[in-house]
Amino acid sequence: MARNLRVLFVASEAVPFAKTGGLADVVGTLPNALKDLGSDVRVLMPYYGMVKQGKIPMTTVAENLEGHLGGTGLAFDVKTPESGDYPFYFVERDEFFERSQLYGTPKGDYFDNLERFSFFCSTILPVCQNLGFQPDVIHCHDWQSSLVPVYLRHRWQGAEILNGAKTVLTIHNLAYQGLFYKEKFPLLGLDWSLFGIDGLEYYDQISLLKGGIVFADAITTVSVGYSEEIQTPEFGYGLEGLLRARASALHGILNGVDYQDWSPENDRLIPATFSKGNLAGKAKNKAALMEAFNLDPKLSKAPILAMISRLADQKGFDLVAAMLPELLDQDLMVVILGTGEEKYHRWLAQEAPKYPGKLGVKIAFDNALAHLMEAGADMFLMPSRFEPCGLNQMYSLKYGTIPIVRATGGLADTVAQADPAVGSGTGFLFTDYTPEAFAAAINAALKAYKNQKQWRRLVENAMSQDFSWERSASAYLNLYKLLVEGE
């Protein structure tokens, strides 16, 4: 293709505007890497209350466009930031998006999420028509935009501006499928014939994600390992048969890291920068981290083990709970940052006072503290039950904070088992999902830490890894071209 590819990202969150997880990091950074490779990339997402609170100056580019909910037309406006590296467009309809959170509260999901995101998907056609933007590829992300491939095949066939557009669906986490009561199916504006085993039906419910998997031209996951795992019963959530049937269209492309934000050499959020060749700054960050969590100064020579995570079973907190007392009997410190399931909020609130000076906990989202933890800790814990990609282990490698991870999904793809005796590897892995296996990996890391010459070699190995977006963006661009030119 002689001209540059035109790509429309359709997603429910993106940094720096609104975030609940790694999806936002990808949508906020991958388009910039694609733009650097010559693509014309635009992003469409909802205009949440969270975006408005950011007070980013916006311009209205369209008013009173019409989306749909079932057979009912609903008006919306389109906003765009006054400045930015590439165009973002926000669908504004306060009835759906002026909420305190993106998808729900700690008490549960919003009752009308099907309505909210099916309406959002319906806006793609009028937005493209209004902007005069004819995409070659529409890149959708997770269940919230999975109706777009369905609508392209079954509602928008006569729309000239979308004629020939190919669809890519990226699955960031198969556990979240967008499941709803079948009684709501008419609100999608689709024929009932699509509510079946070859369409959006999933055990007598609507699965929006399944619709995207069935009708997208290509499906990607955020690591090679995860693309293989989701074709098995253990990780497939009942969709493994469909994913195996579509295996020829399924591609694993590892997420990248934005080293403009996550690099110890230029991190503006940490007290001291440092590099592989000069690690003096890491010690200063460790001291600052100990102070931030009121850790015991007498333990300054002991290692700090960090976790920055959603506090949830998926992230392995049941393993942490099982072995934390035994772990804290040793000369070390543990710091934990995150929010999540209420049971873990309560548990950590109970545990922290039992270990003054050794266990630091903050139940919050705190970006500056996250940077300090990556820079100041010695080891990073990610004992995930499953992990489609994971970003923190890649951040940790760059900061010389050795990851201790379960060998699953993107964790297994990015961390190489260390052999301190010969100076190889970048971290410590375990396979069995048990407290004993997790503890064994931690103990292996603690043993290596005692030999500072071996540990320094391991840190240098870790900091030498490169998971920048350029390689991943090239893989996406090649996939786009394959779809567009393969006609």
Image (tube, rainbow, N blue to C red):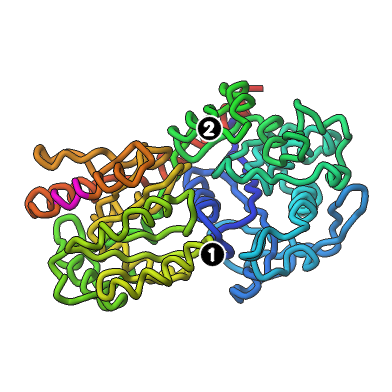
Circle 1 packing at 10 Å, graded few (<14), some (14-19), many (20+), is few
Q: Quadrant of residue 238?
A: top right
Q: Position of residue 215 (x, y in %)?
A: 71, 31
Secondary structure beneath dot 1 equals helix
x 59%, y 73%: residue:
54
For the residue marked with disc 2, what is the amino acid?
Answer: Ile
Q: Is residue 139 left or right of residue 373?
A: right
Can residue 400 be seen here? The reply is yes
First reached walking from the N terminus: tag 2 or tag 1? 2
Q: Is residue 224 left or right of residue 122?
A: left
Q: Is residue 338 left or right of residue 45?
A: left
- Residue placed under numbered mark 1 in the picture: 342
- Residue placed under numbered mark 2 in the picture: 230
Residue stretch rendered in magenta on the structure = 443-448
Can residue 427 be seen here? The reply is no
Q: Position of residue 211 (x, y in %)?
A: 72, 35
x 57%, y 31%: residue:
481
Q: Position of residue 359 (x, y in %)?
A: 30, 69
Tell me the distance, in whole angstroms, between the alpha carbons under discs 2 and 1: 28 Å
Q: Position of residue 33 (x, y in %)?
A: 47, 48
Residue closest to the eye, 59 or 47: 47
Circle 2 packing at 10 Å, graded few (<14), some (14-19), many (20+), is many
Q: Is residue 365 left or right of residue 155?
A: left
Secondary structure beneath dot 2 equals loop
Q: Judge whether 91 appears above or below 432 on screen.
A: below
Residue closest to the eye, 266 or 289: 289
